[in-house]
Amino acid sequence: MRSILRPNAFYIFNLLLIFIFSIIVNSNNSFSLVYTSLYCIFHFLIIYLGIYYYRKALYFIFFLYGLGLDVLWLNEIGPHLIVFMVMLVFFNLTTKYWYNLNSNKIYVIILVLQIILITLEIMFSYIFFQYSISLNHFLQIFFISLLVSFPIFLFFSYIDGFK
């Protein structure tokens, strides 16, 4: 029986999600680069969990995070919730294909999915709530995603190695 003091990687990733979520929903303009970086890491981790740790419990977890981001940022239910839930259905349909890929290919797929995910959220925010789209903000997210994704992927792989 696994001890509560030695949680497995899935629980560690969920603790990271809670920690990052609690920071990004309380954003401050003076640290916008830090919050944008954590926002990118949050999305990377969401996708990483969906690919490597797909299970039915993720529907509840992603629902809570999508709902939390939408309600706390937009005061409406919308883009994060929709995109997170559709992404999980996508992972459910494609989960058998992930096993044949090596870690480098999965890293690239996660990075591409992260950019697509954030782009869809921005587009849905604009369509549903007339949230302004800033090309500078999107490019900042894109470049931060490129910069932090590989070290984060290595860190997550290290966490996966915990026994």
Image (tube, helix red, strand yellow):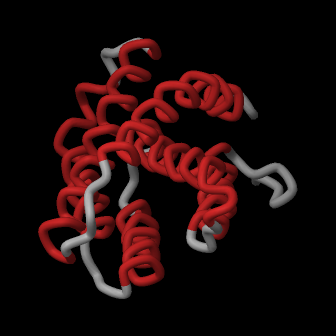
In this rendering, would 85 be left or right of 37? left
Q: Position of residue 56 (x, y in %)?
A: 36, 60
**In this rendering, would 72 be left or right of 153?**
left
Question: On the image, which quarter does residue 156 sit in?
Answer: top right
Q: What residue sits 81% from the left and 60% below the top? A: 4
Whether residue 22 sits left or right of residue 69 in the image: it is: right
Left or right placement of residue 96 versus residue 144 in this view: left
Residue drawn at 61 percent across, 47 percent down: 33
Q: Tell which residue pokes out farthest to the left in this image.
A: 127
- Residue at coordinates 37% horizontally, 76% vertically from top-left? 70
Nearest the viewer among 101 and 140 is 140
Q: Which quadrant of the structure image shows residue 102?
A: top left
Q: Position of residue 162 (x, y in %)?
A: 74, 33
Vertical position of residue 68 compared to residue 158: above or below = below
Q: Which residue is more in the foreground, 102 or 118?
A: 118
Q: Position of residue 106 (x, y in %)?
A: 39, 22
